Amino acid sequence: MSQVVLKARNRVKTGSGEARRIRRSGRIPGVLYGRSGEAVSIDLDALEFAGGIKNISESTIVKVEVDGKSYDAFVKDTQRNIVDGLILHVDFYEVESGVTLRARVSIHLQGSPAGVRNGGVLEFPLHEIEVECLPKDLPERIDLDVSNLDVNQSIHVRDLALGEGVRLISGGDQVVALVKYAKEEAVAAPAPEEAAAAAAGPAAAAPAAGAPAEGAKDAKESK
């Protein structure tokens, strides 16, 4: 996949009023945070940005061109309107070529596990891992084939195939995916006599207070 290129402009004026004006003009206000901590206020075309980030992840490095100057950066955060979902603001974080970085990479499962076809249930407890590498080696995502995963089998972080130059930071013993049988607690049906006694309630199980037991009554009548 070719690198996404986003064209931006330097934004001199800031503030909520200026941000609203920018949005009304069909653009999005944003900030590009540099490697040394400096921040550059920018704005981008809203349609171009929405289309450009449609198929990228948090670990995808995009190229941001600001008035002729290029920056390699992550899309670190996007703020959206909770009503219509429109993007209100975007933050970029610049990365430096040749300098090692740490990033979180998402995991995507592929295939239908053999264990599911045998009555098991697939669980996917870990959706991303942390790695360390050069920007050029950073994977956009990790595709994990779970087709051969059978019941009572699991795949751990240490089992993931990472590209050359990518070092794992997350713990290798963490479970990424597993298949196990669904637990169905079978409740034994009560015997007919027990069911009848339960339906009748406690009054049927013992004589009423003050009433003689059946044997005592028979003995009294025989006198």
Image (cartoon, rainbow, N blue to C red):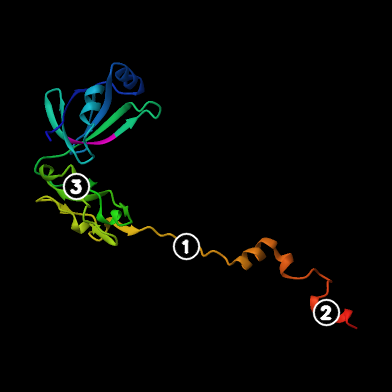
Give amino acid for label 3.
Ile
Classed neighbour count for the residue bearing mark 3: other residues with Cα under 10 Å, few (<14), some (14–19), many (≥20): some
Q: Is residue 76 magenta?
A: yes
- Name the outermost residue toward the right: 223
Judge left or right: residue 149 versus residue 21: left
Q: Quadrant of residue 6?
A: top left
Of 210 and 14, nearer the camera is 210
Quadrant of the image for the N terminus?
A: top left
Circle 1: element type? loop
Earlier residue among tags 2 and 1: 1
Give amino acid for label 1.
Ala
Q: Residue at x 20, y 29 (%)?
A: 52
Q: Is residue 3 visible?
A: yes
- Name the outermost residue toward the front: 222
> Residue 142 bears which disc, if any?
3
x and y percent of residue 86 in the render?
33, 26
The residue that mark 1 highlights is 186
Classed neighbour count for the residue bearing mark 1: other residues with Cα under 10 Å, few (<14), some (14–19), many (≥20): few
Magenta residue span = 73-77
Q: Quadrant of residue 173?
A: bottom left
The residue that mark 2 highlights is 216
Q: Nearer the viewer, mark 3 or mark 1?
A: 1
Quadrant of the image for the C terminus?
A: bottom right
Tell me the CA gap for discs 2 and 1. Answer: 44 Å
Q: Is residue 210 magenta?
A: no
Earlier residue among tags 3 and 1: 3
